Amino acid sequence: RDKVYISILLLSVMCLGVSSQPITDSQRLFSIAVNRVQHLHLLAQRFFSEFESSLQTEEQRQLNKIFLQDFCNSDYIISPIDKHETQRSSVLKLLSISYRLVESWEFPSRSLSGGSGPRTQISAKLTDLKTGIMQLIKANQDVPEIFTDTSTLQLAPYGNYYQSLEADESLRRTYELLACFKKDMHKVETYLTVAKCRLSPEANCTL
């Protein structure tokens, strides 16, 4: 009986070894990129929550009302309008949109990076994420395609980025930056997660 058990165990191990697929370079790069954007999204949520908690209730209400009527700079980057369109988008399209979203924060992130601790690392983390996404774009191009830094959509910094502002306007700008940063990192996390899932044919990539 013991011999039969051992034989079955060995057969199971052998089958497991045959069915297991080695992790490809693309899968490894995707895992790194997803981990990086998840970390940035968590930081964005934390910064926004900390800022909101420092406001009076009426200030929160007014700023939220203004933000809902306003736009983020990155809204000019064409992206899927809902989860269904996201799921229908190609891997390369999701990567390209993610790249542009991350790139759009290169200037504004300097304002986000004020202070100490994790905030000082935002710009560097965005650069690392952007570099990783570019590697994925190159690895997943089915046909030769020019995709350089100069071909991406260049967005102007947020409206009041370089100006000296009154207290109320400064408060609004900070709220806008943090809210938009959180929104965009959530988008990038979603797009990269769906794109990564596409590498596993048997995976369920529903949102």
Image (cartoon, helix red, strand yellow):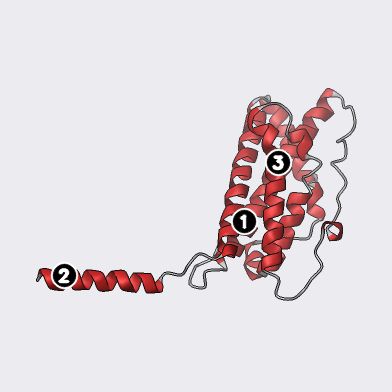
Looking at the image, tell me whether mark 1 or mark 3 is earlier in sequence order: 3
Please rate how many residues cluster around mark 2, counting C-alpha atoms within 10 Å: few if below 14, some from 14 to 19, many from 20.
few
Judge by depth and name the residue closer to the eye, 104 or 121.
121
Please rate how many residues cluster around mark 1, counting C-alpha atoms within 10 Å: few if below 14, some from 14 to 19, many from 20.
many
Q: Position of residue 149 (x, y in %)?
A: 82, 56
Query: For mark 3, what is the residue?
Result: 124
Q: Position of residue 50 (x, y in %)?
A: 63, 30
Query: For mark 2, what is the residue?
Result: 5
In front of the other: label 1 or label 2? 2
Residue at 82 percent across and 55 percent down: it is: 76
Amino acid at dot 1: Thr
Query: For mark 1, what is the residue?
Result: 190
Residue at 87 percent across and 36 percent down: it is: 160
In this picture, residue 197 sits left or right of residue 165: left
Q: SS of the residue at dot 3? A: helix
C-alpha distance separating marks 3 and 2: 54 Å
